[in-house]
Image (spheres, helix red, strand yellow):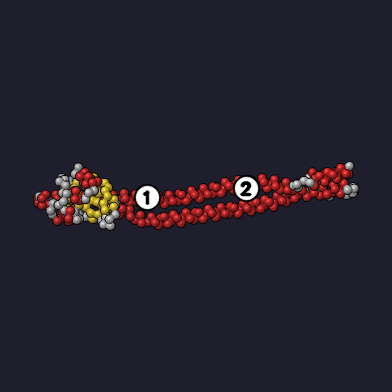
């Protein structure tokens, strides 16, 4: 019987992994898999949040610039329209008060010219032309007395808008080369002078009104870049903080798993050693275990 028990103990020693190793590996495997899955999803979500924040910030900046430019250009169009309407009204009053001079005299009057030609924006102006297609007053003296083809300078859209002014208020865009050789969009608004064959036109480069927004675009882009960089830095910090926490959790789990496995295997080891001593013939040997569980009950069975 003693030889049989000794043989069983020897067979047990051939085990490749101890119970402690198996408990430790199992505990760590379950814990690490759980932590790993949580980490993957958490880091992925952090990345998505960071990317979304950067994209939304950039879009917000672009939207702010676009909406600002649109609002300023709309304001510019209203200013051009109002200027044209005011000049047309002032010209109408002057003509009504000087009807006795005759239209031929009025269209050459310097006083009417001062009323008809006024500045619009930074580089634009108002001008007066007739339904006969002749320009009567213009900021450029070289165009006075010329037809609309000369005024439009090959800009068909401009000429068509001016001709539409024969029948009522007309407005639209056309392209014109500026003094630096750049092609820029201009906006023109035409208002017929009531009870006359004359029309007032007001025109200027529309980007004169939106230029402040365009000039601040670089500042907005800089602010957006700073914000996105801050968001990225915070996300990087959060990710690294999370990684450090996960590593600390793994270390803590490993230590806890080790001590839990040890608390389970040490009594078993003591029981095995006590059994070996008894198997060697020392039947008076007592196995002292105070675990309060089934292993303690088993040791009592050996002691009895």
Relative to residue 109, is residue 274 drawn left or right? Answer: right
Q: CA distance from mark 1 to mark 2?
A: 46 Å
Categorize mark 1 by other alpha carbons within 10 Å: few (<14), some (14-19), many (20+): some
Q: Is residue 65 visible?
A: yes
Q: Nearer the viewer, residue 33 or 93?
A: 33
The reply to whether callout 1 and callout 2 are in contact (CB within 8 Å) is: no
Between 101 and 48, the one nearer to me in the picture: 48
Element type where label 1 sits in the image = helix
Residue drawn at point x = 36 percent, y = 51 percent: 68
Pointer 2 local density, CA inside 10 Å: few below 14, some 14–19, many at least 20: some
In the image, residue 162 lies at what x, y percent? 21, 46
Residue at 19 percent across and 48 percent down: it is 149
The structure residue drawn at horizontal position 37% and vertical position 50%, both measured from the top left corner, is 66
Mark 1 lies on residue: 66
Q: Position of residue 223 (x, y in %)?
A: 43, 56
Callout 2: helix, strand or loop?
helix
Residue 197 as seen in the image, left or right of residue 299: left
Q: Tell me the quarter of the image containing the N terminus.
A: top right
Count all numbered tags in the image, as a single digit: 2
- Residue 86 in sight from this viewpoint: no
Q: Which residue is mark 2?
A: 35
Q: Position of residue 32 (x, y in %)?
A: 64, 47
Quadrant where the C terminus sits is: top right
| Residue 10 percent coordinates (x, y) | 82, 46
* Left or right: where 234 falls relative to 36: left
Earlier in the chain: of badge 1 and badge 2, it is 2
């Amino acid at each position: 019987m003693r030889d049989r028990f000794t043989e069983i103990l020897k067979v047990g020693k051939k085990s490749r992994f101890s119970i402690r190793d198996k408990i430790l590996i199992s505990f760590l495997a379950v814990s690490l898999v759980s932590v790993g899955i949580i980490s993957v999803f958490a880091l992925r979500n952090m990345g998505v949040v960071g990317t979304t924040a950067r994209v939304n910030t950039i879009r917000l900046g672009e939207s702010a610039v676009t909406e600002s430019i649109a609002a300023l250009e709309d304001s510019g169009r209203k200013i051009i329209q109002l200027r044209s309407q005011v000049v047309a009204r002032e010209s109408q009053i002057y003509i009504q008060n000087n009807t006795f001079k005759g239209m031929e005299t009025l269209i050459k009057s310097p006083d009417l010219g001062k009323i008809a030609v006024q500045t619009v924006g930074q580089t634009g102006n108002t001008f007066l032309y007739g339904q006969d297609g002749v320009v009567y007053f213009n900021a450029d003296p070289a165009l006075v007395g010329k037809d609309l083809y000369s005024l439009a300078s090959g800009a068909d859209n401009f000429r068509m808008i001016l001709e539409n002014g024969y029948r009522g208020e007309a407005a639209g865009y056309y392209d014109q080369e500026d003094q630096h050789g750049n092609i820029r969009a201009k906006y023109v608004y035409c208002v017929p002078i009531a009870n006359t064959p004359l029309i007032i036109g007001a025109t200027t480069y529309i980007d004169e009104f939106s230029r402040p927004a365009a000039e601040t675009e670089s500042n907005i882009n800089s602010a957006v870049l700073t914000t996105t960089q801050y968001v990225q830095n915070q996300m990087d910090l959060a990710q690294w903080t999370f990684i450090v926490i996960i590593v600390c959790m793994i270390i803590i789990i490993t230590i806890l798993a080790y001590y839990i496995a040890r608390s389970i295997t040490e009594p078993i080891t003591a029981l095995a050693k006590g059994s070996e001593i008894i198997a060697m013939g020392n039947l008076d040997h007592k196995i002292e275990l105070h675990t309060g569980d089934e292993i303690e009950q088993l040791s009592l069975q050996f002691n009895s």
